Image (cartoon, coloured by chain):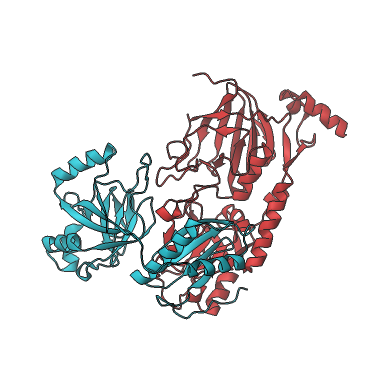
Chain colours: A red, B cyan
Amino acid sequence: MTAGASEAILGILSAGPGSTLQDSGRHGYLRYGVTAAGPMDPLAHATANLAVGNPAGSTALEVSPGGIEVTAEFASLSVAVAGGEFEVNLDGRPLPPAVGLNLDEGAVLKIRAGRSGSWCYLAVAGRFVVPRVLGSHATHTRTGFGGVNGRAIVAGDRLRIEQSGWSKPSPGAMVAPWLDRPVNTVRVVLGPQHDYFADEEIAAFLAGPWSVSAKRDRMAYFLDGPRLTHARGYNIVSDGIAMGAIQVPGDGRPIVLMADRQSTGGYPKIATVIGPDLGRLAQARPGTAFSFEAVSIAEAVAARREEAAWLSRGIVAEPLLRTHLSSEFLLGLNLIDGVVGLDTVG
Amino acid sequence: MTPKVDPGPATASSAPRFLDAGEAALVVEFGEVVDPAINDRVLALDAVLRADPPAGTREFVPTYRSLMIHYDPLQIDRDMLVAVVRRAMAAMTKGRSKATTWTLPCCYDPALAEDLDEAARILKLCRHEAVALHAKAAYRVYMCGFTPGQVYLGGVPKALAISRRPAPRPPHPAGAVLIGGGLCVVAPFVMPTGWYVIGRTPERLYAAERKDAFLIQAGDNLRFDPIDVATFRDLEQRAASGEIVARKSAA
C-alpha cells in the first residue's frame, strides 16, 4: 500500500487497553439513545489539536494509562501530545509531557502513564481517514460506533492521515499552564435531584473526602468516600443524563457519569461537575483525595469563559531548553534550525 | 450555593420545574411519574423547540417526564433559555398530532425468549397466558434511550408487572424484547440487563445504512405480532438485507 503525497500513516507499534480515537463527540442523537462519547478531558483534547493547527474538536488519539507506541510511515507527521503528566519518549529520549514535534518517518514515539493523570491526547496535523458514524469519529466501544471499527486501538493498526501541511519545525514544550490541574477540589452545580437529599447529606457530599475508585472507565467513575442517604428513595423515573452527572444509587455510593455515559438513567443525581472541571476529575488517579465545591451557574459559566479565552489565544510552544535536553539529542533529531533558534534566544 | 428548587409535585397540567444539570443542560420537568399526559407535554415542547431551535441550544432529549435541553451557556444564558422555553410552551399544541402505530413481529418461542418461563413462574402465569397478555396489549413509546434505537414502552398489562432482577443477567441478544419494573423495552444492542427477555424481534430498530437509521420515535404507538421461529429466521434474513419487516400505519 502506498500513500499519496499528502498522506501518511500513523502506525501503532503497541497499545495498552483503552486507547481510542475521539473527536468532540457524536452530538444530536442522545434522543435516540446514542451515547455522545468524545474526550474524557475535553480541555486537553482541544489543547493538543490547537497545538498542531487543527480545529479544537478534531479527531485525536486518546491514550489510556495503558500507553501507546507509534511511528510515522511514508512521510513525517506533525504531532502534539497533551493531557495528564505522561512519560513521552522519542526514539528513547525523554520529552516534556506537553510537547509538539515532527515525527520523522520511522521514528518511534512512546507515551505511557507518568507521574500523574489518566488520559493523554496525541493530535496529528491534518485528519484521520476513518469512516464517520452518524457524523462523528468518536469511538464508543460498547455499541461499536466510530473510531477503528468501533473498537480501541490495537498494535498493528495503521491509521491513514490526510495531512494539513502544517508543520512543526522543532520540538517545543507547550505553554499550557491550564493543564496543571491538581485534583483537590472539583466544582459542581447542585441538582437536578438534590432535593432527594437532606441538607446534612448535601453537606457530607460536598465535604467528602472522596477519591476515585479503581472501578472506573470511560463510562463512569465510582467514588470512594462517605455513604450518602436518600431522603426520598432512590428510584426515579428515568430522565436525561449530562456528562459529569453524579448519580447516587441505592447503596449510597456516588458514580460520576463520564463521556461514554448512557443517555438516560433512573437514579437521583445530586450534582453535576461543571464543564471546566470534567478534565480535572477525569485525570484523577485512584486514591487521590478531593472534595466538591458547589458553585452557581454564573460561576460555572465564568470558568467556561476563562477556559475559552485561554484556548482562543492559541497554543505557544517554547524551544526545548538545553537544560532539559542534551545538544546531542537536538542534533540527533536533525533539527539544526531549532538549535540555531535556541542560540539566538540565548 | 444554588437555591433549592421548589419541591412541589408537578401534575400533568401545572407549570414545569426548571432544573439544572450543570451549566450546560436544563431539565424541563413536567412531572415525576410515568403518565401519558405528562409525556404528551414533553413531546409537544420537544416538537416546538426542534421546529425552530433557539440559538445556542444543542440538542433536546425527551424522556418519560422531562425534556433535557443541552445548550452552550456562552451563547445563551440560563435565564434567557428559560424565557425562550416559556414562550415555546405557549405555542404547544394540546395532545399528540400524528401518532404512527408500529406492528413489530415478535417471536415468543422459549428458544429465543430466554427468560419467558422464569418470568411466567415469578408472575404465577403459564407461558401461554404471559405471551397472550403481552401480545394483546397496546403500547406507547415513551422515550428512546440507553442504546441506539432502544425504545421504552408503557402499556404493559398489570399481570406482567415484574420487578427488575436483583442482579443483572448475562448479555441478551440484539432485538430482545424485555419486561421489568412495569415497563417493556425493545433492545437492539447486546447488553447485560436486569430485565427479563420474553421475546425477540427480527426488526432492526437501528440500522446505520438506512435512510431513517432510527425506526421508531418517542410518541409512536406499538403492537407486537407473534411469529414462530421459522418466520423469525425468514424475517431476520430479510431485515439483514435492508427490508423493514415491521408494519407502519398512521393512526
Q: Position of residue A157 (x, y in %)?
A: 48, 30
Q: Residue at x 72, y 50 (%)?
A: A310
Q: Position of residue A234 (x, y in %)?
A: 41, 71
Above or below: residue A268 compared with residue B237: below
As drawn, the residue found furthest toward the top would be A2
Q: Nearer the viewer, residue B140 or B175?
A: B140
Residue A85 visible, this orientation? no
Give the quadrant of residue B72. Answer: bottom right
Residue B83 screen position, x and y as percent: 57, 69
Give the x, y percent position of residue B104: 23, 52
Residue A345 visible in the picture: yes
Q: Is residue B182 left or right of residue A251?
A: left
Identify the image quadrant of residue A171: top right
| Residue at x 52%, y 79% (from the top left corner) | B6
In this picture, is A161 found above or below A177? above
Q: Is residue B248 left or right of residue B21?
A: left
- Quadrant where the image shows the C terminus of chain A: top right
What is the count of numbered marks? 0
In the image, A139 versus A325, the foreground residue is: A139
In the foreground, B167 or A266: A266
Question: Is the residue A178 above or below the residue A231 in the image?
Answer: above
Q: B201 or A317, which lies in front?
A: B201
**In percent of the image, x 43 and y 60: which residue is there?**
A264
Quarter where residue B97 is shown: bottom left
Q: Is residue A258 left or right of residue B221?
A: right
